[in-house]
Image (cartoon, helix red, strand yellow):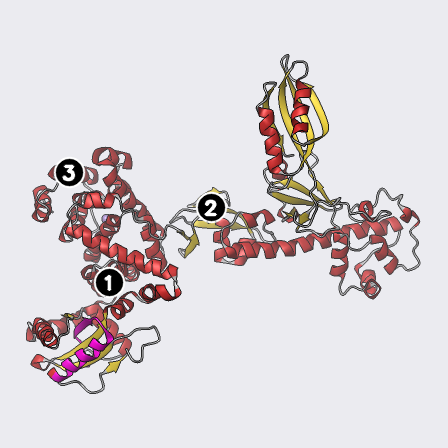
Amino acid sequence: MMRQYELVERVKRYNPSADEALLNRAYVYAMMAHGNQKRASGDLFFGHPLEVAAILTELKLDDATIAAAVLHDTVEDTEATLDEINKTFGPQIGALVDGLTKIKRLDLVSKRAAQGENFRKLLLAIADDVRVLLVKLADRLHNMRTLQFMTPEKRKRIAEETLEIYAPLAGRMGIQEMREELEDLSFQNLDPEAYEAINRHLHELTLKSEKLVEEIEQDLTAKLKAQGIEASVSGRQKRPYSIWRKMERKSVSFEQLSDIFGFRIIVDTVDECYRTLGVVHTSWPMVPGRYKDYISTPKQNDYRSIHTTVIGPGSQRVELQIRTLEMDEVAEYGIAAHALYKEGINGNSRLANESRAYQWLRRTIDLLAEGDNPEEFLEHTKLELFHDQVFCFTPKGRLIALPRGATPIDFAYAVHTDVGNTAVGCKINGRMSPLLTELQNGDEVEIIRAEGQTPPAAWESLVVTGKARASIRRATRAAVRRQYTGLGHQILERAFERANRPFSDEKLKGALPRLARASMEDVLAAVGRGEMFSGDVVRAVYPDYKDERRAGADGQSAKPNGAAKDGSGDHASGGIPIRGLNPDMPIRFSPEGGAVPGDRIVGILTPGEGVTIYPIQSPSLAAYDNEPDRWIDVRWDLETHDPQRFPARIKLQSINEPGSLAQIAQVIADHDGNIDNVAMKRRTQDFTDVTIDLTVWDLKHLNAIIAELRAKRVVSRVDRVTG
Ligand code: MN
């Protein structure tokens, strides 16, 4: 195990002004915290964080990162608390350890390594600081190096996850060496035999052609320079995992693989690509059939490059890729980089943002490693990557990406429309939670469903995803239709009962032609909506029936038809400008308070009565929480109507003195409010409760009146009552 002074020495080697005291404190603290904990290998656990720190010293990272690496498992695995870390090491290191603890908890949730890209974004979204990601990568690297002590199942899972998530992340962050080691270690664990075979071959080859790579690199650079081409030439012997992938992809044996040595030549322009090709082909004999020009004919995925293979020094086949920097970025980072280059033209900002996010990460890491004053630099560079998104898991480990602010309702609809439509509750991280909770990164969300449910229309304005909104609208529309048919059925039953005639579906079916409707459901819905009189339906079924009470004495008739239509033909809604309902549907405001434009409103359907409009904050609505079928989505429909007044109720406490009520009335009158009713109740010696029903133009108007009343000396408090 690394000694305390060794750790300090390692850091001092690249950073002579390192904070020795800090490193020593972290060392001792973590050592005490982990105590006698052992790893699967039987070694002391404390060795692990030290190795992680050592890996990071190779990247020449700052003191805070090294200290955080030493401390990275303390909060999750020992008695240590974040509070204590904050107190002992300051908020900066505290924040780093906190980030690492959060990511570590994710490991427990991520049961499936699928959806790697989303998981990487989740890591980026959680890590506020690039150093958190670096420690996490080093942590994973050390765990991979010591994987042999785990059970076979665990090895497989961790290796797959590494290949899927962490190796590409290291690559995206520009730490290619770490990416390759992670890939090779994963490969070694997933297919030990193949790994050994390839490794053996590679080893033999290395012995034969030790200096080859260097030779070719220098040779090529010099030859290109002589032609006036500034090129960056990088060559290397390939790694076991990338050889394996190629063998799999092309189904060839190791001996058939020509490109164990690969060189990449990056130049400035397309023209230079072809001139470079000329230089290469005149320097070494080319292997026939291996030349491919993906610049003139790009691959489907927009990959562009020239490929050729030549017989280089020592008769070793050497593969070369010649391309510009732009082509290289597209090849390395895919479509996102491509979008970035095209951004000026078609502005695909989301992909460009992703690409820029990774580019920015790479630059940050470069700056970190240069290490002039990383603390000061990092202080002002919070990672705000993918902060407009939030990533949550299903109980089975599927990762769902949602816009920030999303609720479990959005989550449910993202999983499946049926899940959303039947959602009645949810558990977040195992705890019952309201469906309107704002989701956080890494939350595991379990939706509780009840078949036959309809989403409350009020959800529509509370969700943030378009999919949820559209689905809720569709489901409520269907539900509203069901409500109308149900309501129509009740109305007809009563109408037939009143007429003393038997009512049956069969009989109604026979009368469909006379009613000029296509289906029973149409008739029921039309009656429910008030588009068709129940009396007309009775007469259609029983043509001989005469309704003696038709002239208007029918106080008992079902209101949707009766109250509104019989005799007068006026709408029961009294012209209440509400959208979302058929104009013939009887509408009223909650008698206990009303609603005014500007209020967010919802309708509650009462079969046989119609729809009552409530402001969304109305306490009465709680009574309908378990009856989502009765909630109807309504909106104000003001453009189409002349200005009109709306009912509202306010409650005041006024001081008992002569003239106080007159003053109150005066304020309302001065503000163009109409008082409909006043009720007073003496509360104490000094105060009276006054309830005033008034009509106003809209919410702004009402609020102005309330504000003015509050300013009166004789009024001690004013509240709006919303039923
Ligand atoms: Mn660890």
Amino acid at pointer 1: Ser
Element type where label 3 sits in the image: helix
Q: Which residue is at a point 84% across and 50% down the rendered structure image? A: 495
Question: Where does the C terminus fall, quadrant-wise?
Answer: top right
Q: State which region is magenta.
A: 256-282
Q: Quadrant of residue 710?
A: top right
Amino acid at pointer 2: Lys
Labels 1 and 2 touching (C-beta < 8 A): no
Location of mark 2 (residue)? 427
Mark 2 burial class by Cα count in 10 Å: few <14, some 14-19, many 20+: some
* Residue reaching furthest to the front: 670
Mark 3 burial class by Cα count in 10 Å: few <14, some 14-19, many 20+: some
Q: Is residue 234 magenta?
A: no
Element type where label 1 sits in the image: helix
Location of mark 3 (residue)? 22
Q: Is residue 410 above or below residue 91?
A: below
Residue 152 makes an appearance in the image: no
Mark 1 burial class by Cα count in 10 Å: few <14, some 14-19, many 20+: many
Element type where label 2 sits in the image: strand
